[in-house]
Image (tube, rainbow, N blue to C red):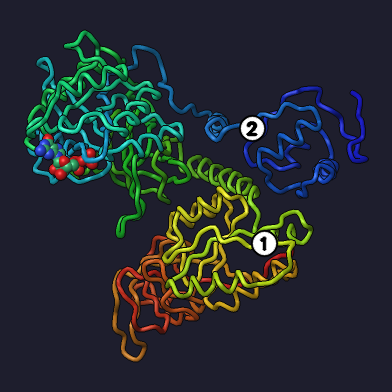
Amino acid sequence: MSAPAIGGVQVARGNGATIRLPRGASLSDFADRIGANPASLVQIMLHLGEMVTATQSVNEETLQLLGAELDYDIQVVSPEEEDRELLEAFDIEFGEDEGDEADLAARPPVVTVMGHVDHGKTKLLDAIRKTNVVAREAGGITQHIGAYQVSTTHEGEERKVTFIDTPGHEAFTAMRARGAKSTDIAVLVVAADDGVKPQTIEALNHAQAAEVPVVVAVNKVDKEGADPNKVRAQLTEYGLVAEEYGGSTLFVDISAKNGTGIENLLEAILLTADAELDLRANPSMGAQGIAIEAHLDKGRGPVATVLVQRGTLRVGDSIVCGEAFGRVRAMLDDTGEAVEEATPSYPVRVMGLTAVPGAGDNFIVVTDDRMARQIAEQRAARKRSADMAKSSRRRTLEELFSDLEKGRVDELKLIIKGDVSGSVEALEDALLKIDVGDEVRLRVLHRAVGAITEYDVNLAVADDNAVIIGFNVRPEPRARDLAEREGVDIRYYSVIYQAIEEIEAALKGMLKPEFEEVQMGTAEVREVFKVPKIGNVAGALVRSGLIVRNSKARVIRDGVVIADNLTVSSLRRFKDDATEVREGFECGIGVGYNDIRLDDVIETFEMREKPRV
Ligand code: GDP
């Protein structure tokens, strides 16, 4: 192979050879695959104008750039493929029934209800649940767990149908986007008095893209002005032709409000399932399926509703679910009854996981706890490096400053959020008055009062180098996650001149790396206690990270900082003093601030020296 020098470095060229790299790979990983020295790849990247270290995760564009330069065909492996490979290493195949035809048994269809807002999805799910004779006989109070199962008599046979109880196509598409196939049949709800609407079509598109058969529930037929036939006519344009019009789609007129037509709808679902689908699974293997929803319960710890897709899930099984793992301590069905086992298409709440999995995460029963832990840990490690690669795409304020200095960018874009409109305006005015000559400009993309929202973060993402300034405000939890994932820089200030100084220094390219605030943990106030001599103490649940005694703290109410410069002066677990309390645990926190209220958030942080860029 010829080896021309690139930037004075000799590296063998690939001549179009393919190499597969996981998302978030580093130059070292790249070098490994092609038997090169990582340092020479670092030099080549430098020559191409990007400074990356050998072990740092890089984004896909960087890998592709390097690949093109060295004549390699780079295939960045998707997270789904990567996960499949990870499981293969443990000799696990997710999504396949073991054995042959003879091992398969019929399973109930799993149904998602979709449709335009206000067309009656929630009402329909309630109405269907009310027909659940089984639950009523058991005397159980049905609970919302994200899915439920009902029975009906179909052609003289007792049949079951499982409904995913999170209406809307958001959940459906979110799960599908993650490669989780959760649904066999979609019920498209269309209000007969309103007809086909944009979200009706959107929902239909999603169902069709997922190749999921559709049953149309024409709802609100009790209403005056309802025109069920118009709905049928409208939907023919979108390829859904009613049976009575010579097509193959079943349309059922219902009134979710009055509970009429529900049995017919269940019948139509089963007819469609029997005609179009082969719903069978092997019930006698280690269970597999997906998590539908999950939360952290006060007393029980992480609780996940899972849908068994194949196999039988039993109390005592070792399972791994996304990045969570554990042993099934107990299972409850949708009536709150404890169950010992769950067969295919059966939704159950599972207790015993170490962490809260995400909706759409797959779960797998494995041979022992050790394997469960290993898989979960490897997934977590991969996610971290993928996240790091993602965040390396965007620049932090420090990097931006150095770019400004080098004349690579000439504009600093800001998004300003503050606690009151006065301070937002004052800050904006002051910032715009900073005079640093003509070379650099400062532009405020958006300013508003209130917590930092997902909108703000998305705006910063869309505008590549925008930085968000939070003046006495904090991000909403989802916005914080998004910012972390996307690598958006959020700067917090509580004093105007501090903000001005820092931005001015930045614009002048003089910013010295200094101390940075690192969030350590957050806790939600659940109760307030009066303690003699100490004052009010919060009974709180640690929501994230760690609450550490003596760390710095502030109190946030509705996304706004209401007290700052506090210290965690007392920390208790039950009656005992504690030095630290972890995520998911309850504790008593005293921060020397008396006006603490229910639902306030206590945020703790420490100051760490920032590395120089
Ligand atoms: P979603 O947004 O699709 O979940 O819709 P909802 O289930 O919240 O229903 C929206 C509104 O329509 C509510 O006020 C319901 O009471 C009403 N509604 C739902 N189904 C019917 C029905 O069959 N007949 C009538 N008259 N009203 C209904």
Observer-nearest residue: 376 or 18?
Answer: 18
Indicate the quadrant of ligand 1 in the picture: top left
Q: Residue at x 32, y 44 (%)?
A: 350
Q: Position of residue 498 (x, y in %)?
A: 60, 77
Identify the image quadrant of the N terminus: top right
* Residue 287 position by quadrant: top left
Residue 331 to residue 565: above or below:
above
Separation of marks 1 and 2 at Cα, in angstroms: 38 Å
Q: As drawn, is 407 to the left or to the right of 245?
A: right
The residue tagged 2 is 76
Identify the image quadrant of the C terminus: bottom right
Q: Residue furthest front?
A: 438
Residue 363 to residue 303: above or below:
above
Q: Residue furthest top?
A: 246
Does the residue tagged 1 have its C-beta within 8 Å of any atom of ligand 1? no
Q: Residue at x 22, y 45 (%)?
A: 144
Query: Can residue 333 be seen here?
Result: no
* Neighbourhood count class around disc 1 (C-alpha, 10 Å): few under 14, some 14–19, many 20 upward: some
The residue tagged 1 is 441
Amino acid type at image mark 2 = Val
Instruction: Please tell me whether mark 1 or mark 2 is closer to you in this view.
Output: 1
Q: Position of residue 122 (x, y in %)?
A: 20, 40
Q: Position of residue 455 (x, y in %)?
A: 45, 53
* Neighbourhood count class around disc 2 (C-alpha, 10 Å): few under 14, some 14–19, many 20 upward: some
